[in-house]
Amino acid sequence: TALAMSSGSYRSLNQPRDKLPAQLQRSIWIDNLTVKPMLTGVSGFALPGEILAIMGPSGAGKTTLMDFMAGREMNRFRGITTGCVRINGRKRTRDFVEISGHTQSSPVFLGTLTVKETIDYAACLNICNSSERKARVMSVIRELHLEKCLNTTIGTPLRKGISDGERKRLAIALQLLRKPSILLLDEPTSGLDTRSSRQVISIVRGLADRGYTVAINIHSPDSTIFHQFDRLLMLVAGRVQYFGKANVAVECYEKVCERKRHMFQNPAEFLFECDTTVETVYQLPPDPSELTAPGVNGYHPKDIEKSECSCCFPSDDLQAILAANAARKSRPSIIWQFIILSLRSWRENSRNIAKYHLRAVLYALIGACIGSAWFDLPQTFTTLHDRQTMLMVIIVFYSFMQVASIPSFLVELQVMNREVLDGVYPVHAHMLQSFLSGILPNFLLALFSSWIIFKMVGIGDEGRGYPLFLVNVFLMLYVAESFAEFLCTFLPNLLVALCVFAGYFCISFIAMGLLVPISHLPIWWKPFHFASFHRYSIEVFCWNAFHGWNVECDLWPKYLCRIFRTGDDVLKARDMSSDEEDIILDLKVLLFQAVIYRMLSWMVLSAKTWSNTCTQV
């Protein structure tokens, strides 16, 4: 027995479909979609002014279907997909992002910003005209009922913020700023209580009544929410069990399952109870025009009125609609977006305790510990080893503490990924602001902590030694942070990124040339030596600490000190250069490595973004 589409009235639009603005006259069709092994032969559609609810038990393929409809995570569908998604009868292209809005089941935001700041920055990134921007911001705030939480921070693991329901509404608000005609909402009620769930769906219902095409992925709605839906697509084990009017789904299931729903039973619960007894699948034909043909799959779906199918507008009109939409939604320039991203990043960094504030405290404590342990270290033969150990401790602790930037980078990259996939700005705009916005904080970290060590230990002449010491510490911190961001781009998992970061630092530390001089390293360690940024940083530290001074012999008899008479002898014993030009070259290499890691991050993000967006599928 199959579940076919049954007759029944649907909710009326505020205005006829053919009277809607051109930018809202868009329907989305799924034609015989198969994604092995998750989905098999899935077909359906969503029309302007309607809510299509995609329901099914856990593991049925709802999220996979929603990702495919939105054109997200397309790299995992390559080679295992047949069928397509059509917009107004035309195959979807990369321009689809301009007319659609997609929200995640667990939306991610910059947690230290307030709701108003988040919306304002998003509006600045999307809208050029200031008056239009202000009007749009106030409009979405009213539509999503966010007035009460405008000045509340979104929240971080260290600080409570807005509720889950407000986060869901904020995610929808950010999409509405772009004025999409198609809204694809992935589990907008997950994790919410009954009241919050109903509030979110009520808002979505209002958007549909204004002409938006809405498709939502939902697990188990209550009866009040269920009756807000116009159409229902029930997925079971990756197959369509039912697709049709939501208000007649129960009647259809009652006939097929040969049992009646209890008067007070939730319709969704009844459908889930019946799903194990129904095996045959009803599928729409690949061509929407065939929906009115008699005998589709052996059925006669007389309920599909021609007025509904007329909403599949001629495909020739799509490009004209897209062109008009693009002209109306002209994007701000890259320079303007870079400025806005930089301002947003600075505000986020200034409030994010876990990113730079905590590191500043740690660096100050480490600097004070190093300074007190090696306080006023004399330049004598017996303290040569102590001085080298002190430089090694600076290298290890200062560079490794940049691991604290990984959690913040992961959150920022999730926000960036959402905004780039939404077509708000290109990847290079984010990478440029990330490259520049990290300079000043790391310089301030280096300035404060390096002064403590330099003054307490007495490393060298302040006129020459401190500027070089400061620049070296800054570049070391900046390279380590750049590497941390690079790790986050292709290893977006906190535990994995931390483990790889620690492993890389162990290898880099061993190969830097202080513990084992380069002349004593096995040949297979040589590539690691020259790739290690620790190698260049420690050479600058040692040159700054030992070059140009005579070793005072504090042993008896004096001839025991003959092995190291000058600081250059110490450098030579460690296979380090005493030439000032080589030290300048070391600093250039450190800067070059920072740039290389940022460029690699840009390349990885660009490749991921391109592969994760839709082409003609």
Image (cartoon, helix red, strand yellow):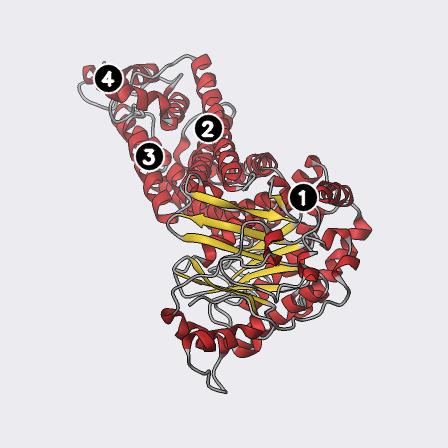
Q: Which residue is mark 1?
A: 340
Q: Is residue 464 left or right of residue 204?
A: left
Q: Is the residue marked by circle 3 packed among few (<14), some (14-19), or many (20+) residues within 10 Å?
A: few
Q: Are marks 3 and 2 in contact (CB under 8 Å)?
A: no
The residue shown at (63%, 71%) is 202
Q: Which residue is mark 3?
A: 504
Q: Is the residue marked by circle 2 packed among few (<14), some (14-19), or many (20+) residues within 10 Å?
A: many
The amino acid type, in three-letter code, at marker 1 is: Ile
Q: Please tell me which of labels 4 and 3 falls first in the chain.
A: 3
As helix, strand or loop, the secondary structure at mark 1 comes to: helix
* CA distance for labels 4 and 2: 28 Å
Q: Are marks 4 and 2 in contact (CB under 8 Å)?
A: no
Q: Quadrant of residue 227?
A: bottom right
Q: Please tell me which of labels 1 and 4 falls first in the chain.
A: 1
* CA distance for labels 1 and 3: 34 Å
Q: Please tell me which of labels 1 and 3 falls first in the chain.
A: 1
Please state, as top left, top right, bottom left or bottom right, where the N terminus lies in the image. Answer: bottom left
Q: Are marks 1 and 2 in contact (CB under 8 Å)?
A: no
Front position in the image: 242 or 23: 242
Where residue 472 is drawn, which disc sits there? 2
Q: Which residue is mark 4?
A: 523
Front position in the image: 469 or 353: 353
